[in-house]
Image (cartoon, grey):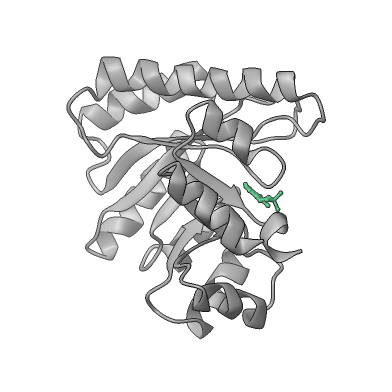
Amino acid sequence: MYNNIHAYCKENKITLVVVSKTQSIEAIRDVYQKGQRLFGENRVQELVDKYGILPKDIEWHLIGHLQKNKVKYIAPFIAMIHSADSWELLTVIDKEALKNKRKINVLLQYHIAQEETKYGLSEHEGLEIVRRYLQNELPHIQICGVMGMATFTDDQQHVRKEFQHLKSIFDHLKNKYFPNEDYFKEISMGMSGDYKLAIEEGSTIVRVGSAIFQ
Ligand SMILES: *Cc1c(COP(=O)(O)O)cnc(C)c1O
């Protein structure tokens, strides 16, 4: 399935992050050999292990909840953290980025699903973060956009509404706070079951795992 999904994303000018969590090194190498360089993992330990073994030109994306005490393990090399979901976490990422003399790209993860268990910011929390960021309180972070996960349901109309909600959050931030900042441009939404829907609703990055490795 990799070739089809890759071609679909390319046609639509969408960034494809292949989610390789739980996949073997061998399975990941197969996709790498087809040309894929962006991979996503949701657990720090697994990410660090795979980073150590696989080719160094892979860009690793962290897509799962990140604990503050684990930021240091990924700060030297992570290409983007999709799951920035609190001010406290962002301050830790900023400190670790400084230690590594780099800027770290992050996306603000918003809570758009109905489920209680999913992590993510409210719109109010997101605004507070953006205000402080624009006052230069996080000088070693670049906020590149937003991320969200839809409710796990077969109800396409419901999922579509949640994606539209995330898109509207993005548009508001973009227009009001980042009109001239070219780096603020990403909407990370869409997984195996809903990436086509997400692209219709304005996604710029899809995170697809199981559909590629099945
Ligand atoms: C696992 C995961 C994905 C990919 O899910 P699939 O349904 O396997 O495509 C995307 N985003 C996050 C945050 C994940 O944890």
- Relative to 59, say whether 191 is above or below: above
Residue closest to the eye, 205 or 103 = 205
Residue closest to the eye, 50 or 131 = 50
Residue 44 locus on image (x, y percent): 57, 63
Is residue 41 visible to the viewer in this orientation of the structure?
Answer: no
Is residue 51 visible to the viewer in this orientation of the structure?
Answer: yes
Residue 154 locus on image (x, y percent): 82, 30
Residue found farthest to the right? 154
Residue closest to the eye, 68 or 151 = 151
- Give the position of the C terminus as an image quadrant: bottom right
Q: Residue at x 27, y 63 (%)?
A: 99
- Relative to 111, say whether 22 is above or below: below
Q: How many marks?
A: 0
Q: Residue at x 39, y 45 (%)?
A: 106
Residue closest to the eye, 214 or 134 = 214
- Give the position of the N terminus as an image quadrant: bottom right
Q: Residue at x 24, y 60 (%)?
A: 102
Residue found farthest to the left? 180
Residue 46 locus on image (x, y percent): 62, 70
- Relative to 43, say whether 126 is above or below: above
Residue 80 locus on image (x, y percent): 41, 53
Residue 158 placement, left or right of 104:
right
- Relative to 84, say whether 123 is above or below: above
Q: Residue at x 40, y 44 (%)?
A: 13
Residue 147 placement, left or right of 95:
right
